[in-house]
Image (spheres, helix red, strand yellow):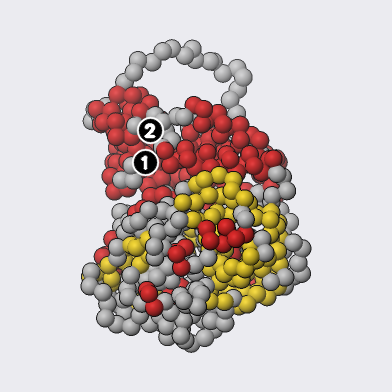
C-alpha cells in the first residue's frame, strides 16, 4: 500500500483512451459474484507433469514475475506468431505496459488480445484492468464478468472484481472474490497481496517477513519500502495492542466549530479542527480522502510524538518530499471528543511553500466513520450524528457467510431509504472520488478534497474539454471569502507536499455533479501522473475547496455516500 496522498494548498487522469457511453460510466457497477466452479471429482485422471521447454512466452511470464517489465515485453513480442495464440501474448504485454504506467500502450495490446480471441478469459481480464486504471468502472466490470458468463473461471477476473467491489464499498463481495482468485492462482503476487490484507495480523506479519527475506524482483523499491513500513507498524501494534485509535464514548450527536486553517501571518480559507495533540494545541486542516492524520514536525516536537518507523511521503511538487515518520500519539482531543492511542504521520523538514510550511497538519474526517458527518462549509460547522442502522443480512449475504465464514466480518454498501438520492463515492488507495462533468465531457471520476484549495483538471483532460494557456489568468482569484486569504499565495501558483507545482490554466469551465452546476472563468490544469501512477488510478482532476466551500456536505464514510446541499447562494468565482 502506498503511504500518502499529496495535500494541495494554494491554487491547488490521463486522457481516457476508450470513451464509454456517458450514462454507463456514471452507473454504479452491479455487485455480482460469479458462481463457484464445479468441484473436481476425486476420480479425475491426474496429468503427470513434465518439464516444459522454455519458450519466449514462458520467458516473458517469468521476466514479468521478476519485475523485468521491459524485457518481458521484448520476450512476449518475440513469441508473436500471427496465430490465435497471440491473444495470450498481447494480454501479457498489456499487463507489463501497465506496470510501466504506459496506459495507452496497454490499452492497445489488451484490445488486440480481445480482437484475436474474443473468448479468451485472460484477454478480457487484461482489458478490464486497463479500464479500471482509467477509472472506467462499468466497462471494467463488463470485461471481468465476461469469462464467467461463458462458463470459465479466471483468477485475474476475480481480482479485478475484488478491486471494483473495494472501490464501491462492497467489502463482503470483495472478500469472496479475492478468496476465489487465490483458490484459482495462489502464486499470483498481486492476488496474494490483496488476499493477505484480509487475513489476521499475525498471518500478515509472517507473510511480509517471508517476502522481504526473499526480496522478489516483482516488487520495486517503493513497494518494498511500503511493505517494510507496514510491517513495522503491524509489529508495533502486536507489541502494543492498546494502540487502536479508539474514540472515547460519546452521545449520538456532537457539534464542532471549525476555524481558519492558517495562523495570523498566513490566513487561509481552508477549514481546520482545533486538536489537542498530547495536550498541544494545533489546527489540522479538515481533509477528505487521505485516510490519515498528519502532523507537522513543529507540532510533533512540542507534543513529544514517539517515532515508530521512517516513511516516504511523496506528493505533487518539484522539490524534495518532506522527511516523514509514523509516530504514536496518546491523545487527540477535539472539543469534548478524544481519540486515544493513534498512529499518525509526521512531516518534518519540509520544502519551502509546501503544505506543511503553511499548516500544522491535516485530519481526515474518515476517522469519524462511525458517525454521519455533516460538514457545513459556509457556516464552518461540523456535526456528527448517528448513521442509519444496517438491516439484518439478506439471503444472499447469509449464503456468502455460509460458504466463507470470514465473510461475516465484512459488509457491503448499504443505502438507507432516506439516502436513495445521495451520490456514491469511490475509494482508490487514499482518494475519494465522485462522478462529475466538465463542460461537454461525459461523467468521469474526480478526487474530492476539502484540503485542496482550488479545483484542478488533469492537463490532458483539460486540453480535450477546455482551452489551455500558460499565461496566468487576469480575472478574479479562485475564490474570495470575507478577508480570508493567503497574501503570499495570491498569484496563481500551485503548491503541494513537495513544494511548487508547474501549472497551466484553462478557459471557462462549467462543473456538473450531483444535480448541481457551477461556472468558473478559469481553472488550474496540471500533470497529475505522479499521484495517478502512485495510486494506480487515472482520475481526471480534483474538486477542491474553491467549489466545495459553497456547499454543505453530508458524508457517510461507512457506506461511501455523500449528499451536497447548496444551502447558501454564493456565486462561484
Is 560 located above or below residue 418 in the figure? above
Is 211 located above or below residue 256 in the figure? above
Q: In the image as oriented, which residue stretches furthest toward the front?
A: 302
Pinpoint residue 223: horizontal percent, then vertical percent: 45, 40
Question: Total of numbered circles in the picture?
Answer: 2
Q: Which residue is mark 1?
A: 99
Residue 239 is left or right of residue 8, and the answer is right
Find residue 198 and report its image quarter. Answer: top right
Pinpoint residue 554: horizontal percent, then vertical percent: 59, 72
Pinpoint residue 503: horizontal percent, then vertical percent: 29, 65
* Crowd class of label 1 (few under 14; some 14 to 19; many from 20; radius 10 Å): some
Q: Which residue is mark 2?
A: 67
Query: Which quadrant of the rendered structure holds the C terminus?
Result: bottom left
Tell me whether circle 1 and circle 2 mark residues in contact (CB < 8 Å): yes
SS state under label 2: loop
Q: Earlier in the sequence, mark 1 or mark 2?
A: 2
SS state under label 1: helix
Number of the label disc, if any, that sits on residue 217: none
Amino acid at each position: 500500500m502506498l503511504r500518502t496522498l499529496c495535500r494541495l494548498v494554494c491554487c491547488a487522469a490521463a486522457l481516457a483512451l476508450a470513451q464509454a457511453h456517458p450514462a454507463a460510466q456514471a452507473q454504479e457497477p452491479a455487485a455480482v459474484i460469479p458462481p463457484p466452479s464445479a468441484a473436481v471429482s476425486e476420480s479425475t485422471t491426474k496429468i503427470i507433469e513434465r518439464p516444459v521447454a522454455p519458450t519466449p512466452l514462458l520467458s516473458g511470464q517469468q521476466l514479468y514475475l521478476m519485475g523485468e517489465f521491459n524485457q518481458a515485453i521484448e520476450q512476449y513480442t518475440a513469441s508473436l506468431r500471427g496465430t490465435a495464440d497471440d491473444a495470450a501474448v498481447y494480454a501479457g504485454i498489456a499487463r507489463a505496459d501497465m506496470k510501466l504506467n504506459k496506459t495507452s500502450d496497454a490499452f492497445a495490446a489488451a484490445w488486440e488480445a480481445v480482437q484475436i480471441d474474443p473468448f479468451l478469459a485472460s484477454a478480457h481480464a487484461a482489458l478490464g484492468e486497463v479500464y479500471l486504471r482509467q477509472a472506467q468502472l462499468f466497462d471494467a466490470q463488463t470485461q471481468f464478468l465476461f469469462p464467467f458468463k461463458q462458463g470459465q473461471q479466471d483468477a485475474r477476473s476475480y481480482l479485478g472484481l475484488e478491486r471494483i467491489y473495494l472501490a464501491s464499498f462492497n467489502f463482503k463481495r470483495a472478500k469472496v472474490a479475492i478468496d476465489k482468485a487465490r483458490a484459482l492462482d495462489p502464486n499470483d503476487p498481486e492476488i496474494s497481496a490483496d488476499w493477505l490484507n484480509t487475513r489476521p495480523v499475525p498471518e500478515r506479519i509472517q507473510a511480509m517477513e517471508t517476502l522481504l527475506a526473499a526480496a522478489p524482483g516483482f516488487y520495486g523499491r517503493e513497494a518494498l519500502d511500503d511493505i517494510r513500513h507496514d510491517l513495522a507498524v503491524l509489529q508495533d501494534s502486536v507489541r502494543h495492542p492498546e494502540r487502536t485509535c479508539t474514540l472515547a464514548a460519546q452521545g449520538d450527536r456532537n457539534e464542532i466549530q471549525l476555524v481558519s486553517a492558517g495562523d495570523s501571518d498566513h490566513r487561509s480559507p481552508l477549514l481546520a479542527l482545533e486538536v489537542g495533540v498530547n495536550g498541544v494545541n494545533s489546527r489540522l486542516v479538515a481533509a477528505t480522502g487521505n485516510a490519515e492524520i498528519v502532523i507537522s514536525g513543529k507540532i510533533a516536537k512540542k507534543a513529544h510524538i514517539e517515532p515508530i518507523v521512517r516513511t516516504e511521503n511523496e506528493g505533487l511538487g518539484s522539490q524534495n518530499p518532506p522527511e516523514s515518520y509514523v509516530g504514536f500519539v496518546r491523545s487527540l482531543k477535539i472539543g469534548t471528543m478524544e481519540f486515544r492511542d493513534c498512529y499518525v504521520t509526521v512531516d518534518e523538514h519540509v520544502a519551502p511553500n509546501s503544505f506543511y510550511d503553511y499548516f500544522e497538519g491535516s485530519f481526515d474526517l474518515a476517522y469519524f466513520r462511525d458517525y454521519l458527518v455533516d460538514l457545513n462549509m459556509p457556516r464552518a460547522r461540523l456535526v456528527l450524528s448517528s448513521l442509519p442502522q444496517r438491516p439484518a443480512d439478506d439471503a444472499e449475504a447469509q449464503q456468502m457467510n455460509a460458504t466463507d465464514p470470514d465473510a461475516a466480518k465484512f459488509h457491503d454498501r448499504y443505502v438507507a431509504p432516506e439516502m436513495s438520492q445521495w451520490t456514491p463515492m469511490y475509494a482508490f488507495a487514499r482518494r475519494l472520488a465522485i462522478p462529475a462533468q466538465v463542460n461537454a465531457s461525459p461523467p468521469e471520476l474526480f478526487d474530492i478534497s476539502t484540503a485542496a484549495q482550488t479545483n484542478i483538471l488533469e492537463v490532458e483532460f483539460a486540453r480535450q474539454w477546455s482551452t489551455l494557456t500558460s499565461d496566468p489568468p487576469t480575472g478574479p482569484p479562485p475564490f474570495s471569502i470575507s478577508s480570508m486569504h493567503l497574501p503570499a499565495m495570491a498569484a496563481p501558483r500551485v503548491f503541494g507536499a513537495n513544494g511548487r507545482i508547474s501549472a497551466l490554466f484553462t478557459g471557462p469551465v462549467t462543473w456538473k455533479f450531483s444535480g448541481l452546476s457551477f461556472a468558473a472563468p478559469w481553472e488550474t490544469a496540471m500533470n497529475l501522473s505522479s499521484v495517478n501512477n502512485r495510486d494506480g488510478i487515472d482520475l481526471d482532476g480534483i474538486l477542491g475547496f474553491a467549489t466545495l466551500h459553497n456547499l454543505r456536505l453530508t458524508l457517510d464514510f461507512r457506506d461511501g455516500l455523500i449528499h451536497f446541499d447548496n444551502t447558501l447562494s454564493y456565486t462561484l468565482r
